[in-house]
Amino acid sequence: MSKKKDKPDGEAGKKLSGTAYERELEKLHVELVKLQEWVVAKGLKVCIVFEGRDGAGKGGTIKAITERVSPRVFRVVALPSPTEREKTQMYAQRYIPHFPAAGEVVIFDRSWYNRAGVERVMGFCTEQQARRFLEIVPAFEKMMIESGIILLKYWLEVSPEEQTRRLTQRIDDGRKIWKLSPMDLKSYSRWYDYSRARDEMFEKTDSSWAPWFVAQSNDKKRVRLNIITHLLSKVPYEEIKRPRVVLPKRQKPGGYKEPDYPYKFVPAVF
């Protein structure tokens, strides 16, 4: 009798309610704070890479990870297009300065894998450059790990129908229109070129020391919870016991009075 194959995350079960999502996210945020304190105390270096198609939910997932931790420990790196000078540098040169030092978690919202994806598909690099990148990146990542970096690579996979829905939604939403660049529109029409590039990227760079983890992201709430849970399982940590916090007594005014100063108050519109 054949064994039933498990469904990838995000494909099983009904959509999470907002209440259930917030309840589970709160628990995970507590654990992320514990992880943060452990990373700082032990001087760990953690690097997390997020890749995926436009509209796959990378930004929302990163926000869910970082909204309750310190930006001085959890740093998000989202580099713009390379400058003319950077185009003449060794390809990885612009990414290396952002790698984590001891006590840091660095999250790349897109990364050096731009060369295997958008640069290759949209013609910003030659086919020879893309293939050379795929050849050398496993060794590059092995050097990262041998230097003490914990490297996690996530690919968020969205269906073509859901991507269309999300990108269409951005057109008339003043809060999201900035997310729809001319490059996004060009990329949208190249679905299968991106699929072929993704497949070869997985084939060449899914190493035993730096594997790819694929997360189905049609359900935004579910994928955020799944990725945070997975992240917590991949970075060993323990809760650091701290003494119970008691607020000290506030000093007496000692004759202090608020000055009669013409403050420029923010208008109470609401």
Image (tube, rainbow, N blue to C red):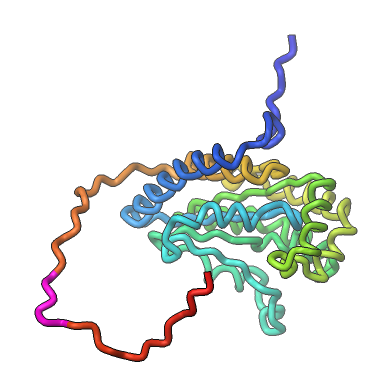
In the image: residue 1, left or right of residue 207 = right
In this view of the protein, which residue sits in the foreground, 228 or 91? 228
Secondary structure that dominates the magenta span = loop
Q: Residue at x 19, y 49 (%)?
A: 243
Residue 103 image point, x, y percent: 38, 59
- In this rendering, the count of numbered labels is 0
Q: Does residue 31 sit above or below 104 in this rendering?
A: above
The image quarter in which residue 256 lies:
bottom left
> Magenta includes 254?
yes
Q: Does residue 104 sit above or below 153 in this rendering?
A: below
Q: Does residue 119 sit above or below 150 in this rendering?
A: below
In this view of the protein, which residue sits in the foreground, 25 or 33? 25
Q: Which residue is drawn at 29% across and 46% down?
A: 240
The image quarter in which residue 181 lies:
bottom right
Q: Give the range drawn in magenta.
A: 251-256
Residue 50 image point, x, y percent: 63, 55
The image quarter in which residue 170 lies:
bottom right
Q: Quadrant of the N terminus?
A: top right
Residue 146 image point, x, y percent: 49, 54
Residue 48 image point, x, y percent: 55, 54
In the image: residue 64, left or right of residue 236 = right
> Magenta includes 89?
no
In the image: residue 21, left or right of residue 214 = left
Q: Residue at x 81, y 68 (%)?
A: 183
